């Protein structure tokens, strides 16, 4: 069976025009994400990482070019915003219902939408929670579990809808280093099982290399492709790969690429403040 989740970014430009400022956030970007690929986007603050995610999700418009999923255009200058269940987003800030249990949070969406019946949703939800290391926590309320567990619940809640594409916008940014390490393990476990296409936005270069198949390094604004880094580290992966020679080589390559752009962004900010 043909895998779904093929993303094509075709000469995309995004211009914001608040009060006539005409700010170009993304300029003439073209790239492709294969079905079932885990792709991370890194770059300095303000380079357009989240803008890309929002355009792909259908939350923001495209000024020029188009974005296609499995050959169908989902964003272009002439197309209305079209968020869809085939593209599900997990944001930086959590959004679990505090009055619902873990399992109720996970199953609420598909049951309410009539996508699957309650019995099937519960069975499916329990299975995904088990893979995410949350077996035994189904009847707990969000306030009674850790922040890392809450993040896992949100990812499971996104996956139960069986999207073609999972969009993750710095989902682990607020977590401490030890919790983040645990989150990486469970996300990799889920990815190995579900095989969905993932676009992952992050500032953490170690995280990007450890999790992804390819790292897309963006330039400072206006954001465009600076370079691809192919992460040729075999899967499944565990924490030991972080001390391997190849991981350290890839990490250094990413640091050099991002540092150069971060320096440009800093110098631009200094000039703008001086005006």
Image (spheres, rainbow, N blue to C red):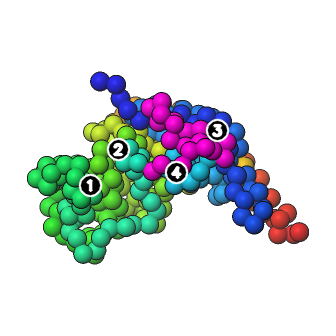
Which residue is tagged 4?
81
Picture layout, residue 269 above or below residue 198? below
Quadrant where the N terminus sits is top left
Which residue is tagged 3?
65
Residue 73, magenta (yes or no) = yes
Please tell me whether mark 2 or mark 3 is closer to you in this view.
Answer: 3
Nearer-N-terminus badge (1/4): 4
- Say which of 155 and 107 sits in front: 107
- The span from disc 2 to disc 3 (Cα, nearest Å) is 24 Å
What label does residue 113 carry, if any?
1
Density class for disc 3 (Cα within 10 Å; few <14, some 14-19, many ≥20) is some
Residue 11, magenta (yes or no) = no
Nearer-N-terminus badge (3/4): 3
- The span from disc 1 to disc 3 (Cα, nearest Å) is 32 Å
**Please, what secondary structure does the residue beneath circle 4 have?**
loop
Density class for disc 4 (Cα within 10 Å; few <14, some 14-19, many ≥20) is some
What segment carries the magenta color? 63-83
Density class for disc 1 (Cα within 10 Å; few <14, some 14-19, many ≥20) is few
Nearer-N-terminus badge (2/3): 3
Please tell me whether mark 3 or mark 4 is closer to you in this view.
Answer: 4
Number of residue marks: 4
Nearer-N-terminus badge (4/2): 4
Picture layout, residue 158 above or below residue 174? above
Can see residue 152? no
**Please, what secondary structure does the residue beneath circle 3 have?**
strand
Quadrant where the C terminus sits is bottom right
What label does residue 163 carry, if any?
2
């Amino acid at each position: 069976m043909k895998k779904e989740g093929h993303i094509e970014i075709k000469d995309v430009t995004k211009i914001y025009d608040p009060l006539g400022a005409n700010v170009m956030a993304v300029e003439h970007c073209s790239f492709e994400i294969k079905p079932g690929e885990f792709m991370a986007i890194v770059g300095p603050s303000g380079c357009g990482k989240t803008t890309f995610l929002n355009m792909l999700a259908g939350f923001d418009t495209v000024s020029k070019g188009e974005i296609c999923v499995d050959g169908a255009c989902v964003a272009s200058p002439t197309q209305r915003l079209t968020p869809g269940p085939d593209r599900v987003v997990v944001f930086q800030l959590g959004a679990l219902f505090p009055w619902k249990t873990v399992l109720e949070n996970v199953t609420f969406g598909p049951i309410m939408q009539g996508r699957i019946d309650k019995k099937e949703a519960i069975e499916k939800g329990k299975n995904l929670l088990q893979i995410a290391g949350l077996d035994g926590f189904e009847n707990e309320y969000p306030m009674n579990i850790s922040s890392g567990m809450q993040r896992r619940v949100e990812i499971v809640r996104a996956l139960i809808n069986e999207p073609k594409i999972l969009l993750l916008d710095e989902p682990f940014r607020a977590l401490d280093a030890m919790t983040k390490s645990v989150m990486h393990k469970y996300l990799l476990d889920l990815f190995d099982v579900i095989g969905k296409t993932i676009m992952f936005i992050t500032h953490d270069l170690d995280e990007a290399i450890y999790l992804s198949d390819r790292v897309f390094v963006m330039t400072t604004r206006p954001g465009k492709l600076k370079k691809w880094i192919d992460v040729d580290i075999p899967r499944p992966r565990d924490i030991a790969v972080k001390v391997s020679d190849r991981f350290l080589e890839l990490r250094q390559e990413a640091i050099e690429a991002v540092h150069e752009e971060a320096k440009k962004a800093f110098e631009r900010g200094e000039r703008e403040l001086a005006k």
